[in-house]
Image: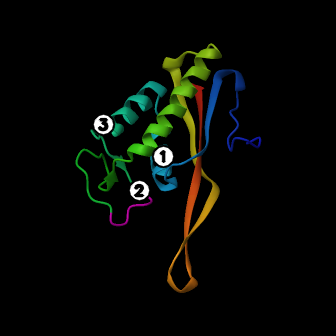
Amino acid sequence: MARVKYAYEPKDELNSAKAMGYEMDISFKHAVEICRELKGKKIDEAIKYLEEVIEMKRAVPFRKYKKKVAHRSGLQKWYAGRYPVKAAKHILKVLKNLKANAEYKGLDVDKLVITHAQAKKGRVLKKYTPRAFGRATPWFKVLTTVEFVAEVR
């Protein structure tokens, strides 16, 4: 694995914690929408939110990738939403890692706020399915990298 830099560097390294999920097999679009929703929340609040998404009790509002997305009840100030369970499970692991990193550094977990949440496209795994008459259909899979930074507020 190559050394990956964070897109955001906190002002005070001693009062912040970082975590990254590198090249996970999840939907990039779902990861973007989940990261948008988690930014600005406390860590325990974000973990609880993702657990409710996995149980399909709360929907994630889809603000950017919203074409042909159904309306969901319970969304505040928005209409379109989904329950991205697979992406939520992977991102939940990263958030638990973020919490463990903060505890290891001796930070007060109750005061930590997620100040940076970003999803980036990773490598593309290329496969081809043979078709009739010598043709082939591409079957590409885009891996997703998710990074979080939490700071004491």
Residue 46 rendering spot, x and y as whole percentages: 43, 32
Q: Is residue 73 rendered to the left or right of residue 132? A: left
Q: Is residue 49 above or below residue 130?
A: above
Q: Is residue 20 above or below residue 144?
A: above
**Main secondary-structure element of the magenta-colored stretch:** loop
**Residue on which the image places disc 2:** 63
* Callout 2: SS: loop
Q: Which residues are magenta?
A: 63-68
- Amino acid at circle 1: Arg
Residue 124 rendering spot, x and y as whole percentages: 63, 59
Whether residue 40 is visible: no
* Callout 1: SS: helix
Q: Are dots 3 and 1 in contact, CB under 8 Å?
A: no
Q: CA distance from mark 3 to mark 1?
A: 20 Å
Whether residue 34 is visible: yes
**Residue on which the image places disc 1:** 36
**Residue on which the image places disc 3:** 55
Front in this rendered view, residue 29 or 129: 129
Q: Is residue 109 rendered to the left or right of residue 77? A: right
Q: Is residue 1 rendered to the left or right of residue 49? A: right
